[in-house]
């Protein structure tokens, strides 16, 4: 159960006194409650291991902008299945497939319809019509000696919540909106390495492909995709007198994020 009351007051100091600036003040109240039930079961047979679960959620929300005299109520019910099956190929070799469906709700601040003026030509605007995003995730993981892993994953997200920038006249407006879909493939290798008794190394190498599509996003079509890659490593050194030194390094190639493209 959530109750949020955000009363933002902006005053101007004029002629020796403070005067309320109603154009930049904002009062927003938000209530939300989520009722959920979950059931799970598991079974093991020889080299096979099964796990399955199902969660049901009923959400009721009420966003009320007292400043704009605008109210948005919503109620929805969703089911979220999860599960995995694993198989021991041989000693020190294991294969596992996992599936899950999950929900990510918009933040309370993003649901506030008020406009925040950053400068005369750039505004940030809330979106009370934002819907939650839903992701179907699939992962196939190979594990060697319970340490080394290689994971092939595919995720399909609908109603993705992402920043969109558009223009009204000569004004740029930033607003979180729902993008129709995002599909992403990834291949991730996790390689631990015990260099010496006092030096441990954890290394991860990944390759991604992401694609964002929407047939009507602010009156335009969106089809933005790219391959990206990355590498990160953590070096942990055990020093005398119980001191520990940790070194981290990571590198990512340019990629795409919603309507944006890095170069």
Image (cartoon, rainbow, N blue to C red):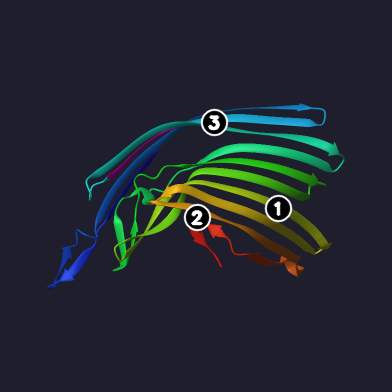
Q: Nearer the viewer, residue 124 or 34?
A: 124
Q: Quadrant of the C terminus?
A: bottom right
| Residue at x-position 77% and y-position 40% | 95
| Residue at x-position 54% and y-position 65% | 262
Q: Quadrant of the N terminus?
A: top left
Which residue is disc 3 drawn over? 55
Q: Nearer the viewer, residue 29 or 104?
A: 104
Residue 113: image location, x then y, percent: 31, 50
Q: Give the Cα separation between the discs numbered 2 and 3.
A: 29 Å
As displayed, is residue 57 above or below residue 204? above
Q: Nearer the viewer, residue 194 or 220?
A: 220
Number of callouts: 3
> On the rendered structure, is 67 left or right of 216?
left
Q: Give the Cα separation between the discs numbered 2 and 1.
A: 22 Å
Which residue is disc 2 drawn over? 258
Q: Which residues are magenta?
A: 58-64
Which residue is disc 1 drawn over? 188
Which of the 4 image quadrants contains residue 39?
A: top right
Q: Are marks 1 and 3 in contact (CB under 8 Å)?
A: no
């Amino acid at each position: 159960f959530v109750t949020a009351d955000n009363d933002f007051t902006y005053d101007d100091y004029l002629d020796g006194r403070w005067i309320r600036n109603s154009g930049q003040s904002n009062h927003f109240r938000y209530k939300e409650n989520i009722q959920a039930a979950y059931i799970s079961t598991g079974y093991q047979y020889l080299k096979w291991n099964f796990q399955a679960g199902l969660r049901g959620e009923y959400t009721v929300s009420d966003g009320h902008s007292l400043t704009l005299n605008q109210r948005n109520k919503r109620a929805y019910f969703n089911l979220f299945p999860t599960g995995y099956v694993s198989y021991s190929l041989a000693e020190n070799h294991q294969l596992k497939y996992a599936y899950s469906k999950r929900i990510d709700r918009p933040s309370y601040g993003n649901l506030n319809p008020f406009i925040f003026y950053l400068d005369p030509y750039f505004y940030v605007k809330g979106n009370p019509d934002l819907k939650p995003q839903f992701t179907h995730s699939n992962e196939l993981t190979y594990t060697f000696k319970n340490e080394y892993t290689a994971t092939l994953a595919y995720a399909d997200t609908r109603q993705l919540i992402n920043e969109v920038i558009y223009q009204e006249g000569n004004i740029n407006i930033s607003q979180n909106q729902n993008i129709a879909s995002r599909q992403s493939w990834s291949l991730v290798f996790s390689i631990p390495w015990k260099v010496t008794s006092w030096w441990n190394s954890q290394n991860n190498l990944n390759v991604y492909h992401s694609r964002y599509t929407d047939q009507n996003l602010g009156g335009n079509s969106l089809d933005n995709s790219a391959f990206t890659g990355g590498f990160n490593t953590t070096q942990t050194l055990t020093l005398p007198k119980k001191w520990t030194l940790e070194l981290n390094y990571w590198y990512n190639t340019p990629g795409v994020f919603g309507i944006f493209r890095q170069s």
